Image (spheres, rainbow, N blue to C red):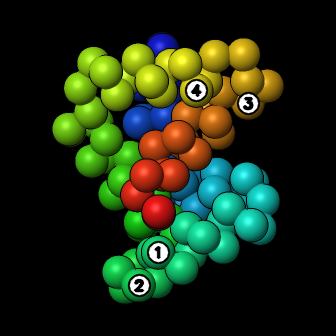
Amino acid sequence: MCLIAEIIHTCSHEKVAQAAVASMGSGFAGKVGVTAGAKGLSIGAFTARAVREFEKIGGEQEKQALRRAMNGSDQPILAGLQHILEPVIE
């Protein structure tokens, strides 16, 4: 399974998404939490929704950028998830 498919498959589930964001550190998780809370969602629900939206609307350019973000990372799944979330939380 390619890494993008792996992110979508796993992080589309709230509990997995919440655990993944928590593992990225309190600073990033806090930013996600603030944005999620403003939308009335938990971190897991917000993250899972963002991943599913990326799957639906992400074109080839977005997927290429995601591949570049994951390339060479020690933790490519988390790097990819962060790449998906960053524009949504800014």
Which numbered tag is attached to residue 69? 4
Q: Are marks 2 and 1 in contact (CB under 8 Å)?
A: yes
Question: Could you classify mark 3 by the number of other residues whose Cα lies within 10 Å: few (under 14), some (14-19), or many (20 or more)?
Answer: few
Q: Which residue is mark 1?
A: 35
Question: Could you classify mark 4 by the number of other residues whose Cα lies within 10 Å: few (under 14), some (14-19), or many (20 or more)?
Answer: some
Which numbered tag is attached to residue 38? 2
Which numbered tag is attached to residue 23? none
Q: Callout 2: helix, strand or loop? A: helix
Q: Position of residue 77 (x, y in %)?
A: 61, 32
* Residue type indicated by callout 3: Gln
Q: Callout 1: helix, strand or loop? A: helix
Answer yes or no: is residue 1 visible. yes
Q: Residue at x 42, y 35 (%)?
A: 9
Question: Could you classify mark 2 by the number of other residues whose Cα lies within 10 Å: few (under 14), some (14-19), or many (20 or more)?
Answer: few
Q: How far apart, in angstroms, are the residues tagged by discs 4 and 1?
A: 22 Å
Mark nearest the camera among 4 and 3 is 4
Residue 28 to residue 71: above or below: below
The mark that comes first in sequence, 3 or 2, is 2
Q: Residue at x 34, y 28 (%)?
A: 62
* Residue type indicated by callout 4: Ala
The mark that comes first in sequence, 1 or 3, is 1
Q: Position of residue 38 (x, y in %)?
A: 41, 84
Q: Which residue is mark 3?
A: 75
Q: Callout 4: helix, strand or loop? A: helix
